[in-house]
Amino acid sequence: MGWFAKRKPGDRVLGKRKAQRVDLSAPVFVYGSINGEPFSEISQTLDVCIKGALLIINVRLVPEQRVLLTNLQTQQDVKCRVVRIDNHRMAAALEFLEPCPRFWCIDFASPSTPS
């Protein structure tokens, strides 16, 4: 039985990204709860994409956890879920729960291909 037999619908293939990433250090505010206790933290992103961000985080988040992310430059909020924890960099990858293409004020449009 190959590795692909264990994949579930929606799983990402190793090495494949859902969206183009851009290095960006943007100030953010993260709010959520852990074991029923609220937490909040001011942090910064390491990189961003049209679907979310990788950010430095000091609290112990877990995959699938829901948080609210605020872009402190625009004061815009977006609901997110934790998709991955990077313990080496003390970072968490967050994915927006709803499309929010202008959250980072970056145009993520892919370059057009020549005809």
Image (cartoon, rainbow, N blue to C red):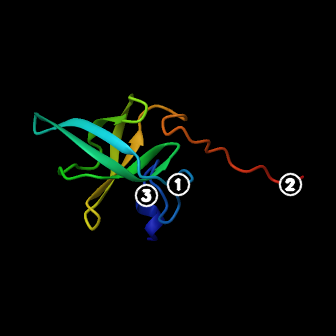
Q: Nearer the viewer, residue 9 or 63?
A: 63
Q: CA distance from mark 2 to mark 1?
A: 23 Å
* Foreground tag (3 vs 1): 1
Picture quarter with the N terminus: bottom left
Q: Residue furthest bottom?
A: 2
Answer with left or right where residue 109 lies relative to residue 105: right
Q: Which residue is mark 1?
A: 21
Amino acid residing under circle 2:
Pro
Q: Is residue 11 above or below residue 76?
A: below
Sequence-wise, the earlier of marks 3 and 1 is 3
Q: CA distance from mark 3 to mark 2?
A: 36 Å
Give percent across and percent down for residue 24: 46, 52
Contact between marks 2 and 1 (CB within 8 A): the answer is no
| Residue 113's disc number | none
Residue drawn 19% across the image and 53% down it: 58
* Number of other residues with Cα within 10 Å of mark 3, as a class: few under 14, some 14 to 19, many 20 or more: few
Residue drawn 90% across the image and 52% down it: 115
Q: Nearer the viewer, residue 110 or 22?
A: 22
Q: CA distance from mark 3 to mark 1?
A: 24 Å
Total numbered circles: 3
Sequence-wise, the earlier of marks 2 and 1 is 1
- Callout 1: helix, strand or loop? loop
| Residue 114's disc number | 2
Q: Which residue is mark 3?
A: 7
Answer with left or right where residue 101 lies relative to residue 36: right
Amino acid residing under circle 3:
Arg
Q: Is residue 23 above or below residue 53?
A: below
* Foreground tag (3 vs 2): 2
- Callout 3: helix, strand or loop? loop
Q: Is residue 1 above or below residue 99?
A: below
